[in-house]
Amino acid sequence: MNDGIFIFSPESSFYYELFLRSGFGLFLLILIVLAWQRKYPIAEWLIILLVGMLGFLIGSRLGGFSPGDWGNWFKTGQLPIERSQSLWGGLILGVTGIWLTKTWLSFSRPVFSLYIIAVPFSLLVLRMGCLVAGCCYGTPVEGSLGLQYGIFSPAFDHHMEMGYLSGFADSSLTVHAVPVYFMISYLIIGIILIRSLKTIQSDRRLAVLGLGLLASGRFFIEFFRDPVTNPGIQGDYLLGLKILQWFCLGIVLISGLVFFLSPKVDPVKATIKNTRYSLLRVAGLVLFVTSLIYYFQAQFSNLDKWVIFWLAFALVITVFIRQLYKVPSPVYRMGYIVLLFAGIGLMSQSVDSDSLKAAKLAEKQNLPLSWGTLRVGGAGGGYRYYNRDCDGSVTSTVHHRYRTAGLGYSRYFNFKNYRKANFDINLGLGYDQMTIYNNAGEISKRENINLTGFGAFGKYDFRWLGLGIGGYTGNMFFMEQNVTKALQTYARLGPYDILFIEGGTFNYFPGSLSYPSAHFAVGTGLGKLDGTEFKFGGIIGDRTETAVFLSGRFIVKQKLVLNPYLGLGKDNGVGLNVEYYFGRNDKKN
């Protein structure tokens, strides 16, 4: 047997995830740039992107279900555990969602031609991950131009199981370089579509041309792909061809008919500027999309949720800005903003006006205002994540349930020119119950982990800039590895009393969720200088499922501080810190 090109990486899952994220990012970047160049209305375009991405993600999961999974879903109404993914299932539901959204919004601009240009280039990057992970390997081939995978690869395991290898083998058989075939085909298709932009003036014709080329390339490459790597029934044979190949032939036939029967120029080109914008229609779509996300959330990976979150977040901000500019008077615009935050502002309770006068007096007389607080807090909740093969199949599900409690002391200083500082000392205790379920839903491991932590943190805030640093020590976080030391950081940009953005690491122990390693947020002080704060943002944890959070710091009579926290994701988490002010005094500088 001739040796092929050897591919082995102990970090194959890391590189697969890296290329997968890069492919998604490139896909969205190309679509946004193309739409920006063509001056598309951004709100409608973002919601089309959101629905299309959601349809693709749901369709790829549904397309990977086996007949047994479908039968169980219809009988029980419960979605089965995700086992595999189907590209063509994602394309069908994604295209359907895009078309329905485009029709609902009366969006007259070209859509599918932009999508089809972005698809091959993003798939090219994604297949780089397949090349490293070895999940889409080919059939055995004679010669030295094939690929060989190491002992930890799916190809090696399959060849060993089939008896193709001896017990002393250290690599798989030489197989067709299917991921490379895919990459070459996607590059060629992408170049053809870019060049066709100048000659094909119909959105529909360019879209079906790209779809037909993708299906044609897939049809021929499937002759060299090992059928065991095809999800579900796609690799089963019917009349000498895989079911997936018959499906590709159908796509090619339909695409060819649509291409030759469609007008060479879009009839709506003359009315391209007449796209209608309806807040009610957009709101209805957002409600529908939210329902789909809630129902199918267990089927989404962490990456899927981040893509959905960012698209949804950008859409909400865009709709808000557009509605704001519809208000004719600048005064009324400010009233519009105030009304939106009025409900949040009521949560801050009443503020002692005497304390604000004292702070302003201290600022004028160069007198620092300082005080201490004693803080108690706690949190509870849970989250889950999935261990997966390189093809996305779930091998086990890990559930975490935690309870934490903490005690802390803080010293605050209020200087002139909106400058503030504080120093915190925190002590926390808690426990985490970790339960691992195998692919059959049975408990394979259960472990209770005690949590302890001690930390110190200092922060200095100018009005437009804030920086902080500190550290924790102890058994504080509870993934597969215990964290004994962590660097706590904080950075803020923007006036803290009006609107700011911030980010940091390890800022939630012990009074709120203790597993995120980093966060980012947008916040406001609701126009107050006394430390009142409301924030909305996202958290970045090690494979965690929670994606967004809400938190606040609300002061009651300048004596009691409430710091609630709500994490929204696969499982909710809630936390509450209560601080009591004491020892307020004014001292000469």
Image: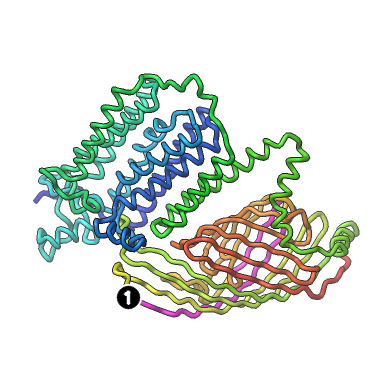
- Quarter holding residue 533: bottom right
Relative to 100, 469 lies left or right: right
* Scheme of image coloration: rainbow
Identified by mark 1, the residue type is Ser
Q: Residues within 10 Å of mark 1 (few under 14, many from 20)?
A: few
Query: Where does the image place residue 467, in percent across and percent down from the top left?
Result: 66, 58
Residue at the front extreme of this rendering: 75
* Magenta-colored stretch includes residue 460: yes
**Is 60 inside the magenta-drawn segment?**
no
State which quarter of the image contains the C terminus.
Answer: bottom right
- How many numbered tags mark residues here? 1
Rendered image quadrant of residue 318: top right
In screen coordinates, is 510 left or right of 418? left
Q: Residue at x 69, y 57 (%)?
A: 344
Looking at the rendered structure, the secondary structure element under dot 1 is: strand
Above or below 190: residue 438: below
Relative to 463, 54 lies left or right: left
Residue 336 left/right relative to 177: right
Q: Report if residue 4 is visible in the image.
A: no
Q: Position of residue 55 (x, y in %)?
A: 40, 46
Give how far across and how far down residue 453 sits, in percent: 56, 76
**Position of 556 relative to 407 (above/below):** above
The majority secondary structure of the magenta stretch comes to: strand
The residue where tag 1 is placed is 444
- Res 322 seen here: yes
Residue pictured at 41% horizontal, 49% vertical: 21
Front position in the image: 499 or 56: 56
Q: Residue at x 65, y 68 (%)?
A: 457
Find the magenta span and give its range. 444-471
Residue at 30% x, 49% y: name it: 86
Q: At which x and y percent is residue 263?
A: 36, 20
